[in-house]
Image: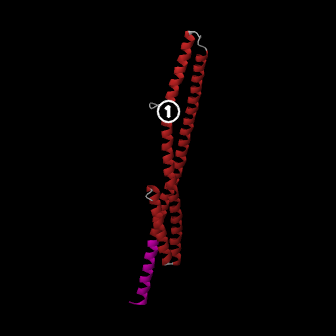
Amino acid sequence: MDALDTTELIESSADKQKNRTALTISILAMVLAITSLGGSNAGKESTQQNILASNAYAFYQAKSIRQTALKIAAADLELQLAREPAMPAPVKELYQKKIDEYKKTVDRYESEPETKEGKKELLARARDHEAARDYAMRQDPWFDYAEGMLQIAIVLLSVSIIGTIPALFFAGGALGAAGFLCMVNGFLLLV
C-alpha cells in the first residue's frame, strides 16, 4: 500500500465520519422540531385548561350567589308569613307559592344533571380542567430540558465536524440521546 492509497483511505474515513455527524445533526434537528411542537402544545393546553377551570369556578360562584340570594328571599317571605297570621288566604297562597318556587330553584342550582350546569356538575368540571392543566404543566419542563439539550448537542456535533474532535461527537451524541429521552418523557410522563 503506497502513501496515496493511505491518504485516500484516511480521507474516506474522515468523510464517513462527517457524513455520520451530519446525519446525526439532521436527526437531532428533527427531534428538536418535534420537541418544540410538543412543548408549545403543552403550554397552550395548560393555559386553555386553566381558563376553562377559572370559567367553571366563576360560574359555580355565580350559582352559589344566586342560590344564597334565593334562600334569603325565601326565608324573608317565611318570616313575613309568620309575622302576619291574619294575612288573607289568597295572599298566603301567593307567598307560599313564591317560597316553594325559590326553594325549587335553590335545589336545581345545587345539581342539574340534564344541563350539567348545577354547582355539583360545575365543580366536577372545574376539577377535570385543573387535572388536565396540571398534566400539561408536568409535561412542559421536560420539553424545555429536551430543547436545551438538543440545541447544545447540535452545536457540539457541528463543532466536531470542523475540529474533527471525536470527544465532541460523543458528547453531542450523548446529550442528543438525553434530549431525546426527555422529549419522550415529555409526551408520556414516564418519570
96, above or below 115, in the image: above
Q: Is residue 65 left or right of residue 142?
A: right
Q: Main secondary structure of the magenta part?
A: helix
- Please, is residue 26 above or below residue 59 in the view? below
Q: Which residue is mark 1?
A: 118
Quarter holding the C terminus? bottom left
Q: What residue appears at the point 58 percent right and 23 percent down from the top-left corner?
A: 75
Q: Which secondary structure, mark 1?
A: loop
Q: How far across and how far down the image is residue 148, in percent?
A: 54, 64
Residue found at the far bottom of this picture: 2
Task: Please name whichever residue, 83 or 57, is drawn nearer the observer in this view of the structure.
Answer: 83
Specify the segment rendered in magenta: 1-21
**Which x, y percent locates residue 11?**
45, 81
Is residue 30 visible in the rendered image? The answer is no
Q: Residue at x 52, y 58 (%)?
A: 141
Q: Is residue 39 above or below residue 177?
A: above
Q: Is residue 149 visible?
A: yes
User: Which residue is pictured at 45% across the width and 65% down the height?
Assistant: 27
